[in-house]
Amino acid sequence: MTRKISALNSLSRGHIRTSWNKYNLFNLYKKRNVNLRGKSLYQQKWYSKAESRAYHGEHLTEKQWSRTFVPNLKGVAQLDSGLQAHNTETPLVLQTYAPLERRLDFALFRSFFASSVRQARRFILSSHVHVNGVKVIQPSYPLRPGDIFSCNPEKVLLALGAKKPSVKQAAKIDFVTVNKWNDFVKKAKENPEKTWNDQLLRKKHGWNGEIDRNTQRILIANSNKVVKKIIETEQEKCDPELILFDILRISSNAGNSDVAILKALTPKFGGNAKKCLTIYQDLLSTFENEIPPSLPNLSDQKLSKLVNRILGFNIQETDKTVKQETSTAKDLKDPKDPKDFKDSKDSKQSVEPKEQAASKGKELVDSKESVETNQNQENTKVDEEATSTFAELKRSEIFNSEEKKLQKKQEKEKTIKIKVKKLQSVKYTLNQITSSLRNQIDAEYNSKFINPNKDNFRVTDLVLDPEWHKNLKPHKPINIKEIVEDESNAKIFLPFQKGLYGRQEAEKPYFTPWKLRPFMGPFAIYPHHIEIDFDTCHAVYLSDPVARPGSSEVITPFGKDISERAFMFYQRKRL
């Protein structure tokens, strides 16, 4: 029969127990070294026995422990002569309570299947423990080397998990959590960058401590995705049209002074500000007809159309115009040639009278009609002279008009050629600025990529996602009274929590979603004589704990002086 609980975790007594209780941790923390001076030998042995028995088998009566005590302490002899020269002492007195480690309840506690020896006893008595596949309900069952024992995984989760809060406690915690979350969302919307940096540097979240490898790789992968996304976004902004748009907008608003324009362009383009100023001056001098005087007052839409019209100046159409004008100039011949400006009817009339006059002259000579022939010849000459005079006048007028048109086209051709050259120069400079800005972006952000296997990783190296706050949404306030009356009224949908705090699965007896109980680290000591599989909640009892040179396999918070006097106390009683 187990001993009754009497002030098990009393802070005034300060005894150390086989338990993971937080009060036991405090007693372990404040425990001072034992001062045995001024005490008689029996007092020393009694004090040592009382302190050590409070930890080793406190649930057993003195009679039960006396039956278990074995005076023959087990140790391992050192056979290596090279190591024997060091004369390392073997602490055999630490084996005083080694027989307790064979008990099933102690083995269950050492294997992290229970939070205390008393809880391990309850698991065994409740038929949740099996040894070699057979249910065992005796907590004092002695294990032998090679025995395999297991515990119900649900009970292990209960033992190692955090305590499940009540509905009222969970509702109060969630009420505060929702209010803090809404305040955080509000701050993030107002100042995303400051809120991001504050979260990284908060000690409460453990950002200044060590981060496990998996979490580190996830954080680094997300940060690298953000850097890649930022580079793509910035590269898209480095477009000749957008750059020319910014040049026209900034320069037109800066005024007419080159110094003021250069000063305004420097923050945006840095070392490329002079090239931007040259582009602006070339456009004003070359495309003065296309650029309106009200350039500073143009809307973004109209300015964008102006940029497209300037950069969309078609050189191929210009070449066609030049060819057409050249062919027109070649078609215009010397004005001395009358056939180029007379109509077809006039030309026929000018040729036919000559042939008729020649034939009629021959006929008149033959028929001796000389008088009529002379008259016809005179009329023909008069007609020819009048026709030639009229053709010359007509030729001169047409030539003058065509010459004026040709001059205008030539001037237009020169203007177009100048615009084409200037536009080519502007486009070349814009391409230079574009490549320069893209190189600057690559140089700036490539250094922000983090190696996933980086050893000296810091959370301050993570890159801020400029859109991280857009997905944050405030939560509707909760009513504690309604939740206490009916737990199903709790509608908690936070990014880090679904359902009531610690009661996501209300039917489970432990905290859900499951998390490790607090203050467990100082008690998590892996035993040397037991092999544990945490995935299946099985363990193998390898051998009885023994003492080795410089150490013992028995886990105890006491030193050799306490163990030695406790052994002397029970050894004397056995004689």
Image: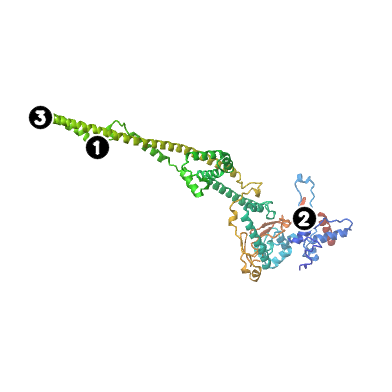
In contact (CB < 8 Å): disc 3 and disc 1: no
Mark 3 and mark 2 lie on one chain; the one further toward the N terminus is 2
Viewer-nearest residue: 95 or 557: 557
Q: Is residue 228 left or right of residue 568?
A: left
Residue name at image x 31 percent, y 32 percent: 333
Q: Nearer the viewer, residue 66 or 553?
A: 553
Q: Which mark is residue 344?
A: 1
**Percent x, y of residue 534:** 65, 58
Position of the C terminus, as image quadrant, is: bottom right
Residue type at mark 1: give it.
Answer: Ser
Q: CA distance from mark 3 to mark 2?
A: 170 Å
Q: Which residue is mark 3?
A: 367
The mark that comes first in sequence, 3 or 1, is: 1
Mark 2, Cα crowd under 10 Å, few <14 / some 14-19 / many 20+, is: some
Amino acid type of the residue that numbered disc 2 sits on in the rendered structure: Lys
Q: Quadrant of residue 7?
A: bottom right
Report the residue that reaches farthest toward the bottom.
Answer: 485
